[in-house]
Image (cartoon, rainbow, N blue to C red):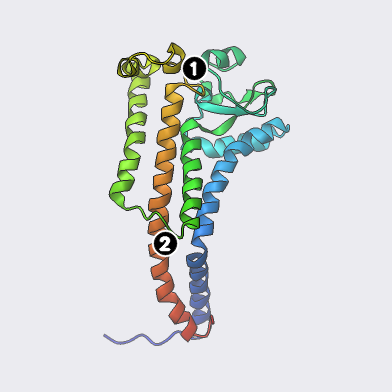
Amino acid sequence: MTNQPPLTGFKRDVVIFLQKLILVLARAWYFVALMAAVTFLALAFLAPAFMASDQPGAGRTIYALLAPHNHQLPQRSYFVFGVKGGIQTYSLAQLLAFGAEADNPEAFLGNADIGYKTGLNHRMVAIFSGLCLGGLIWGLAGGRPRLRLIPFLLMTLPLFIDGLSHMSSDGGAGFREENEWAVIITGGLFPASFYAGTIIGTLDWLLRTATGLLFGLGLAWFLFTYLSNRFAAIRRELEPKLRRAGAIK
């Protein structure tokens, strides 16, 4: 096998330029990854902010951008910028009275009185909140915790079980509507309103939030650990090469 001649001229400049770009990403990956998660979460609240500030075009664009990633059911979403202020949630019956269509509730965005729904539903807000929080903790703690695959899968399992049970229930089983199984397990310790519905304070909201937050934290600590190892290897390979080429100090 013959050795290829060293690159010179324009080709060499292009290769060095691309390697320097990769090295920049390898050095700044943590900030880029964390800001990507923060941006995605911020978009969820930016959509209703645009609607409330009479910029529906921009708001609907963000809703459409986020729609492929979550169902945006209004009864499973937060509402902000309404007359009551703060963060509100509403039952499906309330939303139908407010103007949502029974056969297409996802299309209902809200209004100035009740507020506008976030671009991400309860579970997705919890996931990205966990991802942002977990990433911040990971960075401040000097790259800890360093989560491996099995612990990450264990943190994913509650979300998988809760999500699968909702899919089965929504498909016709209906056992998550009244959550009679939870009434039996808890001995009816809580009021009936806790077991049914999706608003803040109900069992379904609590499970979606808790499992989403747990998954988000696990994803951050697993993904950031993986990226840290991969980009560290890239730096170990590229930095000596670029120094020898005089491209970096």
3D distance between C-alphas at marks 1 and 2: 46 Å
112 vs 207, left or right, is right
Q: Secondary structure at mark 1?
A: loop
Q: Quadrant of residue 181?
A: top left
Q: Does the CB distance between marks 1 and 2 fall below 8 Å? A: no
Check residue 228 in the rendering and tell me which mark sits there, or answer none: 2
| Spot occupied by residue 217 in the image (x, y as percentages of width and height) | 43, 45
Q: Which residue is mark 1?
A: 103
Identified by mark 2, the residue type is Ser
- Circle 2 sits in a helix, a strand or a loop, which is it? helix
Residue 144 x %, y %:
41, 56
Q: Quadrant of residue 213?
A: top left
Assign the C terminus to one quadrant of the image. bottom right
Report the residue at 55% width, 16% height from top: 101
The image quadrant that residue 45 belongs to is top right
In the rendered image, which quarter contains the N terminus?
Answer: bottom left
For marks 1 and 2, give the one nearer the viewer: 2
